Amino acid sequence: MGLKSRLKTSILTLMKRMLPPHETLLRELARRPSIDIEIPKGFESWIEQGRKHLSARQYDQALEAFQIALTHNQSSAWAWHGIGDLHQLEGEHEKALLAYSKACSFSPNEGIHHAGRSNALESLGQLEEAQVSWERALALDSSLTWVRGNRSEQILGDHL
């Protein structure tokens, strides 16, 4: 499989995980002219809003959206992951680690949460623990190599 094909597959996989599947289906149904559906703004909608704000670098609005999602569902791994991404982008690696760890605890079989946790640990210089988290991420989802780009093999080796 070529690089372009792997990249496309990775992006599609990520996009599927960014939007909860049932909400995506509801949105597709709502676009059909013969069906009139009003989608309630549940915690998934707030996560989607948070991701949009995060992409636009509107960090205060993103945090607010993720926090509202958590008021609807305190154990939403995707809301916690969004908060982790936000803190990681702002250079608040301790806060990012806490958020990613919560995402991992609520959804332990999602490799992307472990990858985020690994990146936060690496940023904090906790390389051995970062390597363990990274290996867990890859064991759960081998397509996650895009998360670390050219550095996808070893964390410890990157710093030796």
Image (spheres, rainbow, N blue to C red):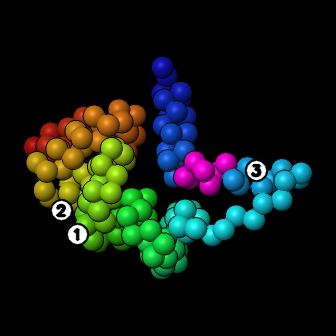
Question: In terms of secondary structure, what is the magenta stretch mainly?
Answer: helix
Mark 1 or mark 2: whose residue is earlier in sequence: 1
Mark 3 or mark 1: whose residue is earlier in sequence: 3
The disc at residue 103 is none
Q: Position of residue 126 (x, y in %)?
A: 13, 56
Instruction: Out of 53 and 25, give the one closest to the viewer.
Output: 25
In screen coordinates, is 154 left or right of 49? left
2 or 3: mark nearer the eye: 3
- Residue named by callout 3: 29
- Residue named by callout 1: 94
Q: Please, what is the three-letter code of the amino acid marked with disc 1?
A: Glu
Q: Please, what is the three-letter code of the amino acid marked with disc 2?
A: Leu
The answer to whether the residue labelled 1 contacts the one labelled 2, judged by CB atoms less than 8 Å apart, is yes
Label 2, residues with CA under 10 Å away: few <14, some 14-19, many ≥20: some
Q: Position of residue 90 (x, y in %)?
A: 36, 71
Highlighted magenta segment, given as a residue range: 19-25
Mark 2 or mark 3: whose residue is earlier in sequence: 3
Report the residue at 10% width, 43% height from top: 160
Q: Is residue 134 above or below residue 48?
A: above
- Residue named by callout 2: 124
3 or 1: mark nearer the eye: 3
Report the residue at 39% width, 59% height from top: 77
Q: CA distance from mark 3 to mark 1?
A: 41 Å
| Residue 134 appears in the picture as rendered | yes
Residue 140: quarter of image: top left
Label 1, residues with CA under 10 Å away: few <14, some 14-19, many ≥20: some
